[in-house]
Amino acid sequence: MGACGGGRSRRGNCRFYKRLFEVADWGPKLGGLGFSHIGREESEWLERAIQEEELKRAVEGCASNKALAPDVSTDFFKHCWNMVRSDLMDTVVDFQESGEFEKSLNASFVVITPKREEHCA
C-alpha cells in the first residue's frame, strides 16, 4: 500500500499535505499586455554614470518641506550642498557600481526631543 493508501481520512490528509507543497499558479498574469520597449541608445543612457550636476538638479527639484527621515529634510541638502555634495555623489556612485546600498543608510534612531524652551534647561 502506498503512502496515501488506506482509509478516507488518511487519503484526505495526504491530499492536504501534497497541496501544501505544490507550486501554486496564482500570481498575476502579464500575457497580452503591450509593453513598450526602449532601444539600445536609451538603455545605455539610463545606465550611464550620474553626473554631479544631474544629482544637484534632482536635489533642487525636491520640495523643501518634505522629510527624507524624521530628522533630515531635503532642505538640508539644498542649503548645505557644498558641504554634502561629495559624500552624496560618492554614495550614488557606489550604488551604481555595486547595486547595493550601505545598510547603515537605512538605520533609524528614535530620539525624544523637547519642543518647549523651558524643557531645555
Image (cartoon, rainbow, N blue to C red):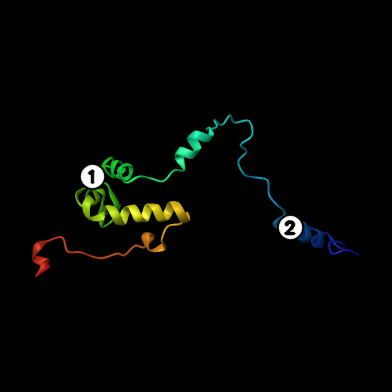
- Residue 58 image offset from top left, x and y in percent: 31, 42
Q: Quarter holding the C terminus?
A: bottom left
Where disc 2 sits, the SS reads helix
Q: Quarter holding the N terminus?
A: bottom right
- Are the residues flagged by discs 2 and 1 in contact, CB closer than 8 Å? no
- Judged left or right of residue 15, residue 77 is left
* Crowding at mark 2 (Cα within 10 Å: few <14, some 14-19, many 20+): few
Where disc 1 sits, the SS reads loop
Compared with 27, 83 (above or below) is below
Q: Nearer the viewer, mark 2 or mark 1?
A: 1
- Amino acid under disc 2: Phe
User: Of 121 and 49, which appears nearest the observer?
Assistant: 49
Q: Which residue is mark 2?
A: 16
Q: Which residue is rendered at x = 87% and y = 62% of the image?
A: 5
Q: Which residue is rendered at x = 29% and y = 54% of the image?
A: 86
- Residue 97 image offset from top left, x and y in percent: 45, 54
User: Of 121 and 69, which appears nearest the observer?
Assistant: 69
Dividing the picture into quadrants, the one containing residue 21 is: bottom right
Check residue 64 in the rendering and tell me which mark sits there, or answer none: 1
Q: CA distance from mark 2 to mark 1?
A: 56 Å
- Amino acid under disc 1: Ser
Dividing the picture into quadrants, the one containing residue 11 is: bottom right
- Residue 100 image offset from top left, x and y in percent: 46, 57
Q: Which residue is rendered at x = 11% and y = 67% of the image?
A: 120
* Crowding at mark 1 (Cα within 10 Å: few <14, some 14-19, many 20+): some
Q: Which residue is rendered at x = 26% and y = 42% of the image?
A: 60
- Residue 117 image offset from top left, x and y in percent: 9, 62
